[in-house]
Structure formats: C-alpha cells, structure tokens
Image (cartoon, rainbow, N blue to C red):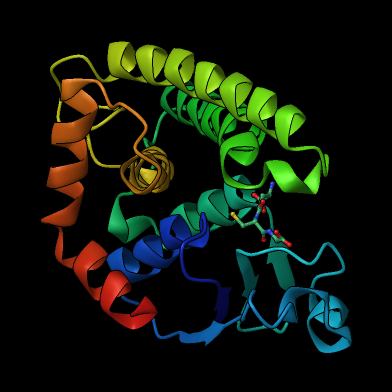
Amino acid sequence: MKFFYAPGTCSIGIHLLLEEIGAPYESIKVDFRAKEQFSEKFRALNPKGKVPTLVRDDGSVLTEFQAIAFWLARAYPKAGLLAEDLEGQTRTMELLDFMVASVHMRGFTFILVPMKFTPTEAAQQELTAHGRSVVADGFDRLASTLGDKDWLMGNFSIADAALFYLTTWAKAKDVALPATLAAFHERMLARPSVQRALKIIG
Ligand SMILES: N[C@@H](CCC(=O)N[C@@H](CS)C(=O)NCC(=O)O)C(=O)O
C-alpha cells in the first residue's frame, strides 16, 4: 500500500491505524506548504486534493477518512480495530461520522483555516468563535460517550484513531479538553503504533 499524508492533519489517524495493522506500506508526504495537494500529479490520484489518500495493493485509490478506516479494519481483521457485530460496527461508524463530518469539518475547520472562507479579519474571528463552540459541544458529547472507559467503543477501534487527531488539534490550538479526553490523548501517545506514526511524520 502507499499512504499519502500531510503533517499536522487528520491523516495521522489513518497513519496510526496502518501501524496498528503492521502490513507493509509506504508513507508519502504531501507538502501542503508547497501546495502539492493541488498538483496535477496528486490530483490524478485524488481529484479532491485531500489527505488521507490510500493506494491499495491492487492499485485502486481509497479516499475519505471513514471509508479508509472501515476498509482497513475489515481487510485486516486480525488487528481487531472494529467490533464484529452489526450493532458495534454501526455505532462505530456513527461516532466516526460525528467526529469527521461535524467536529472536524464544521468545528475545527473554522479554527484552523478561517481565512479560507473570508478575507475579513473580524469575520474570521467570528468563524473561529463559532468553530470553538461546535468543538466544545462535540468534545462534551465525546467525553460522555467515552465515560470511564479507556476507548470509545470499549475495545480500541478505528473510532479512537479519529478522536486522536481531534485531541491533537485541541492541544495545538489551545482548545480546552475535558479531563477524560486529555487522559485519552495521553493513553494514545503511549501506544507504540502512535509513536511510530509520529516518528515517520517527523
Ligand atoms: N472528508 C475528508 C476530510 C479530509 C480533509 O479535510 N483533509 C484535509 C487535511 S485534515 C486536507 O487534505 N486538506 C487539503 C487542503 O486544505 O487543501 C476525508 O475524510 O478525507
């Protein structure tokens, strides 16, 4: 497999899952500073110009965090990254979608890149404030789902990979984390898969 990632982005979630699985793959950095995601070469692979992007061993390209995470978990079941029962799988996907489509796309996006939406400073500040309130609400919900468990679904799963990139952004952007999510972040940092992925990213 070939995995296209960018430092500081949501692709860390998939990177750590690849490390959990242990199957051979090559890490290929997409340099956002050089706007490589918009290059013809990368767009030929993923016309959406986004990471994470995974090229599978048969040459087919898979995009979108939830789809890649689900496929990895199903293709490499020995890694135990997804519940085996339908209800467990459905609840995992429900959580993943909430984290990626709501907390990330409708929350952190406005904190991280408000300038993409408006050139006006005051409007950017309003967007950022809106993003912070969406994230705070999302973290409250996620803390309540986590409860006193170590991992969102009880056992470690693809859902925890998504939560990790969100808690990483929270740390980087000084966004308050409920105590249980801060402890979750530390647990993730202690996992060898996460340490290996962070080392590759540099
Ligand atoms: N829904 C998308 C979200 C991916 C996404 O937003 N990726 C960001 C990095 S976190 C990206 O590649 N952005 C490219 C850019 O900002 O030009 C997915 O899951 O693949």
Say whether residue 59 is left or right of residue 65.
Answer: right
Q: Please state, as top left, top right, bottom left or bottom right, where the C terminus lies in the image.
A: bottom left
Q: Which quadrant of the view contains residue 71?
A: bottom right
Foreground residue among 98 and 25: 98
Horizontal and vertical percent for residue 180?
A: 17, 23
Is residue 122 in sight in this rendering? Answer: yes
Determine the residue positioned at 13% across, 45% down: 187
Q: Which quadrant of the view contains residue 143?
A: top left
Determine the residue positioned at 55% across, 28% down: 103
Is residue 60 in sight in this rendering? Answer: no
Horizontal and vertical percent for residue 144?
A: 30, 10
Q: Which quadrant of the view contains residue 173?
A: top left
Horizontal and vertical percent for residue 83?
A: 36, 35
Horizontal and vertical percent for residue 171?
A: 31, 43
Determine the residue positioned at 49% across, 24% down: 135
Q: Quadrant of ligand 1?
A: bottom right
Foreground residue among 71 and 136: 136
Say whether residue 8 is left or right of residue 54.
Answer: left
Determine the residue positioned at 24% across, 20% down: 178
